[in-house]
Image (spheres, rainbow, N blue to C red):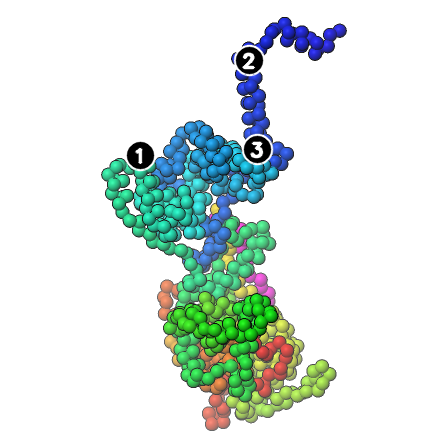
Amino acid sequence: MRTQWQAYRQWKQARGPQTTVELLWKVFAVCLFLGWFYFFSVEHNFLGLFGESPGLDKLQNPRIEMASELYTADGKLLAKYYRENRSPVPYEKISPVLINALVATEDIRFYDHSGIDAKSIAAAFADAVSGDGRGASTITQQLAKNLYKTREKESEGPLYKVPGLGTLVIKTKEWITAIKLERTYSKEEILTLYLNTVDFGSGAFGIKTAAKTFFNTSPDSLNMQQAATLVGLLKATTYYSPILNPENSIKRRNIVLAQMTKYNFIKPEVYDSVSKRPIEVKYTVERYQDGIANYYGNAITNYMDEWCKNNGLDLYTSGLKVYTTIDSRFQKLAEEAVSEQMQEMQNRFDSHWKGKSPWVDENDKEIPGFIEMVAKRTSYYKYLEERYKKNPDSIQILMNTPRKMNVFTWDGEKEVTMSPLDSIRHYKRFLHTGMMTMDPFTGHIKAWVGGINFKHFQYDHVRQGKRQPGSTFKPFVYTAAIDKGFSPCDRITDYRVTINYVENGEKKSWTPRNADWRYSGRNMTLRHALGRSINTVTAQLTEKVGKETVVEYAHRLGITSPIQAVPSVGLGSSDVSVYEMVGAYGTFINGGIWKEPIFVARVEDRYGNVVHQFNPRQNRAISQETAWLMLYMLKGGIEEPGGTSQNLWSYDVFGNGNEFAAKTGTTSNHSDGWFMGLTKDLVTGVWVGGDDRSIHFRTSALGEGSKTALPIYGKYMEKLYADKDLKVTKGRFPKPKIDITKKYYCPTIIQPKVDSLAVDSLGTANFIQVSDSTGTR
């Protein structure tokens, strides 16, 4: 029986030789198959040789890297976070002139082809062989390149490294992707995607950012010469930049206009007119460092970056809209108050020291080598140490070598010539501040001023910095006492008292002194003692309730920093932040419920869907009765005879029955001045001090919290009440919603000759030294 092979050979001999036509058909069939197999291999990454191509899901849901935007509660843009600064716009918001310029210059047959321009395929192959990366790409092909990174490492396969062949594979991927895009999207959608993804240079990605950057306008308002200039940029963003190379930009713009004339998008006379005009650039780079709430923005960046990582998002590419709690109007007025008062205070500080160095020890003697010690903590000094390990003398020479630099002054930034050591000496003379306002009922932070100038002093004194709170800590002692059975009308005598205690097995004693170093001998109510900030009464009360109980209540009220349970704890010997203190004081007005101060109200995705609604953590810290009684006692700082907060009467903040609850605070040697103020709907904390604790005023008349921090608060509240649009109204505190079982109304009547002056300063002797509450930060 014949085999199939024998039968085939016999048939072949019988039919004779192949004709030329048959041979050509075979060659064509083989080429067709090889062509199909090549495109199939590229599309499906055969044997992993060609790299990944975008699938259907990526085509239908393109991930455009979008800048995330940070907004205030009242809708003002605070900042952007991006790797590519891009804010997409819809087709309807793009000028038709720009569309026409793009099509005329980049792809005149855009509306006729299906992703690939057949007339350009041969040219594209020639480009691929020659190694030219651009070729004759259509707009859709360029979109494929921009959108899916076909020319970047994530899409590479082994064949990319083969000269010529790698470029051909890239082109093939772009052709395939372009055809898929044409099947998925309309022409308008493709144009919109393209203009929202393309790089225009100068950090401008997408047409919205480009229009803003180069012409300070919007995409729908671009005129002809602006549109032609932007389209001209696409060929080479640096070479044709109207900023860097204006002459090249004009020539390229005119080529675009010529293309528009050639294809009848504009008339020749329009070309003649527009091509002769100069390019009127209004270069506008978005900058936020010199805007409002810089310290707040910096704090929220760290917070949101971590939050995004924990929730599978990228703050710099996900196109989120982050709505903060900050109110730009509150913030503006807070910054104004800080600037006005701190400038005035700095003048007093400089006059006070009269050119002497303000870094002194407890005896007001200049600390030897202070600037050199500070210099060693700077990054520049550490850099020099690393570079000149074998030649330490070079470090001293360079640290003392004058050079030009821009430095901060209250009269504006100035260019000066000074050495690095002199610049440290210049900057260490400045006083600093931290200030925060919160809505105690929502936990929303309304204003946050972390310092006097973010560009030159980036250390945040609201949350990052922690300092001894002085007498502003005393309310936590009184809160514990009220909660343990005391009433505002209970009495304790102001007299010299010595408290014995044991530390590390060693018997010790401590004798607290009042701010004026005098003891009145009066048996006074707790409300009066708090209003007058009497140290001896606070120390006795701490002993009665227990120093550990004071620490417990401070933590209950929201203080998270470590607190040393020492006899002087009630005088504020442990470091805390303004952020913590504002949250704690908010508990008194919020009926005993502590609410965590929060940065963010909500986060939306790029489509406007709410990703997360932020709600503050909260817990009942104290009873409603204790909270109301503490609020009443804190009013004593203003209402009690000689109250330490009575400087507030110097400001136009009263009237209409307006009430304040307040507490001043001053620490050892006047290193820290504090003021905590509450109204019926706001709580604010202010700290003022030197960058190091050794930098301070030398007298209580200048350095107390009532003279440093209170004026900032007073000026700020004046501004809030004066701005009628804010609707911050004056009024009384709310009445208690529960029965008050303890006696609280016991007005103080004193003889002025008997009582000492009201001051609120803690001498060095009042603080029992603990390891983490002294020294510099």
| Residue 155 drawn at (x, y percent) | 56, 40
- Mark 2 = which residue? 22
Q: Amino acid at mark 3?
A: Val
Q: Is residue 269 above or below residue 280?
A: above
Q: Is residue 216 above or below residue 583?
A: above
Residue 345 in magenta? no
Mark 2 surroundings: few (<14), some (14-19) or many (≥20) residues within 10 A: few
Circle on res. 42: 3
Given the current orientation, which residue lies at the most extreme right position?
1
- Mark 1 = which residue? 262
Residue at 32% x, 33% y: name it: 263
Mark 3 surroundings: few (<14), some (14-19) or many (≥20) residues within 10 A: many
Confirm whether residue 342 shows in the render.
yes
Marks 3/1: CA–CA distance: 38 Å
The number of callouts visible is: 3
Depth check: give the residue in front, 701 or 39: 39
Residue 474 falls in which quadrant of the image?
Answer: bottom right
Disc number lying in front (2 or 1): 2
Highlighted magenta segment, given as a residue range: 608-621
Q: Is residue 310 left or right of residue 340?
A: right
Q: Earlier in the sequence, mark 2 or mark 1?
A: 2
Q: Is residue 557 left or right of residue 651?
A: right
Instruction: For the N terminus, give its image quadrant.
Output: top right
Given the current orientation, which residue lies at the most extreme bottom position?
753
Q: Is residue 57 above or below residue 367?
A: above
Disc number lying in front (3 or 2): 2
Per the image, label 2 sits on a secondary structure element best described as helix
Per the image, label 3 sits on a secondary structure element best described as helix
Marks 3/2: CA–CA distance: 30 Å
| Residue 81 drawn at (x, y percent) | 49, 55
Residue at 59% x, 65% y: name it: 619
